[in-house]
Amino acid sequence: MIAEHDPSPLYAKVEAALTSDIAAGDLSPGSQLPPEDRLIERFGVSRTTVRKAIENLVARGQVEIRRGKGTFVAQRKITQELTELTGFVEDMQALGRTPTARLLDKQVVPADADVARQLAVPPGGLVMRIQRVRLADGVAMSFDETYLPRGIGEKIAAHDLDAEPIFSLLEGKYGVPLTEAEYRLEAVTAAPDVAQALSVDPGSAIFLIERTSYTEGHRPIDYEKLYYRGDLISFVTRLARRSRHRS
Amino acid sequence: MIAEHDPSPLYAKVEAALTSDIAAGDLSPGSQLPPEDRLIERFGVSRTTVRKAIENLVARGQVEIRRGKGTFVAQRKITQELTELTGFVEDMQALGRTPTARLLDKQVVPADADVARQLAVPPGGLVMRIQRVRLADGVAMSFDETYLPRGIGEKIAAHDLDAEPIFSLLEGKYGVPLTEAEYRLEAVTAAPDVAQALSVDPGSAIFLIERTSYTEGHRPIDYEKLYYRGDLISFVTRLARRSRHRS
């Protein structure tokens, strides 16, 4: 029962109480929310108030409505720093998650215009393409398409890519240190092949990172398209205001 | 007609030729692609080859299929730097675009849990919410929801927000310099209200930026949810590899 002397609206209190249950783990990710009638009883509020609170939780991505099934606590999004060049395995280990990979395909293909420009090879020239699904604690987080110049690509592809991260192979095994990368960030919807690889519905939100990593001498060595599940990840960074903007 | 002695696959050449037409402006954004038969004739290739080339252009976002209407050259995406704290007007001016705004709503509302945390006010406490559509060269690029502490918010809301950028008002008029911001980047699909504001279909890809801007003393002063049209913008940045990762 919510105390009556607090001036903030009732739905905000129901929302705050449920948010706090979720944060405390009393309502765990993937579990079903108690039915409306139980919430009405627990908080001593109207159905309209409970619905408004749940609507806000949906809008904030805290819970999700599965049609015909009910309302569920959303899987917790991974919050990943976007502040330095790191690979998936490094990222997940930093977050205390267990990274694994599932190799889907590796083959030599002709470079399309994008790949050619990014790797500085002639269009149609041959490059190695490696397709993997990357998992965190067993959940598919991203579908990665990696393009490498053919020479180093064939060496990398000879390894067990379910077990060995490409960044580790490049830097540790083949003496190709990564120095920096250019990132392009986009929001797209999942095409059928990406949806299938990630076990989501086509049209689901995808956070697409196109990344070109460079080695010494600003030589491009690795071009990736990383299709992250939009519902499972968010990226954070901090940017400073340059003084020329200030009045 | 494509020369026969070049070893790269025919579809890659058709793809490259069309990409170059688009880049040169011979095929302008929004225009319809020539029909298959014309492309077959022009390049002297099979229908399968033309289709494979177009399929690749679709996958790369260069062209888009509108059901029942045909294949069109995609609107050129805006490429925006994500390297310092800037406002929409500054961003568009830097890109040579003309920014405008359309105020949808401004009102004092109770802070939900997110807004309260970001602006360091009590949950349910009153804040100013300003909703605007931001346009570049007349095209709606983003739907922005701005939350301000009530005091400064009421001053800002008294201005003509179709004409005056909030960052300029804060810094120029009210002596509140911005120092830095925290960004959270997500890919989501458009909820009905966002879709309506941006004139896109519900379910379209949205690049969501949640941004908390700070003034001196690391005091949060402006919390925004910026819903960018995913099909019209991409963000770029460069990140360095930290030496501890190298072997």
Image (cartoon, coloured by chain):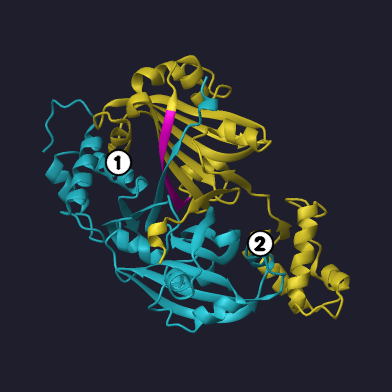
Chain colours: A yellow, B cyan
Residue B92's x, y, as percent?
Answer: 34, 63
Residue at mark 1 shares a chain with residue at mark 2: no
Amino acid beneath label 1:
Lys
Task: List the residue tagged with mark 1.
Answer: B52
**Residue farthest to the bottom, as pictured:** B158
**What numbered label is drawn on residue A213?**
none
* Viewer-nearest residue: A191 or A8: A8
Query: Is residue A118 left or right of A142 when viewed as pictured?
Result: left
Element type where label 1 sits in the image: helix
Graded by Cα atoms within 10 Å as few (under 14), some (14 to 19) or many (20 or more), the crowding at tag 2 reads few
Residue occupying the point 76% across, 56% down: A22
Q: Which residues are magenta?
A: A179-189
Query: Is residue A35 left or right of A189 when viewed as pictured?
Result: right
Residue B30's x, y, as percent?
Answer: 26, 61
| Cα–Cα span, label 1 and label 2 | 37 Å
Residue occupying the point 86% across, 74% down: A2
* Viewer-nearest residue: B153 or A88: B153
Q: Quadrant of the N terminus of chain A?
A: bottom right
Q: Is residue A40 above or below residue B238?
A: below
Residue B83's x, y, as percent?
Answer: 42, 49
Please tell me whether the stretch drawn in magenta is mainly helix, strand or loop. Answer: strand
**Does residue B68 appear in the picture of this structure?**
no
Residue A33's x, y, as percent?
Answer: 78, 60
Graded by Cα atoms within 10 Å as few (under 14), some (14 to 19) or many (20 or more), the crowding at tag 1 reads some
Task: List the residue tagged with mark 2.
Answer: A67
Q: Is residue B171 above or below residue B6?
A: below
**Does residue A4 appear in the picture of this structure?**
yes
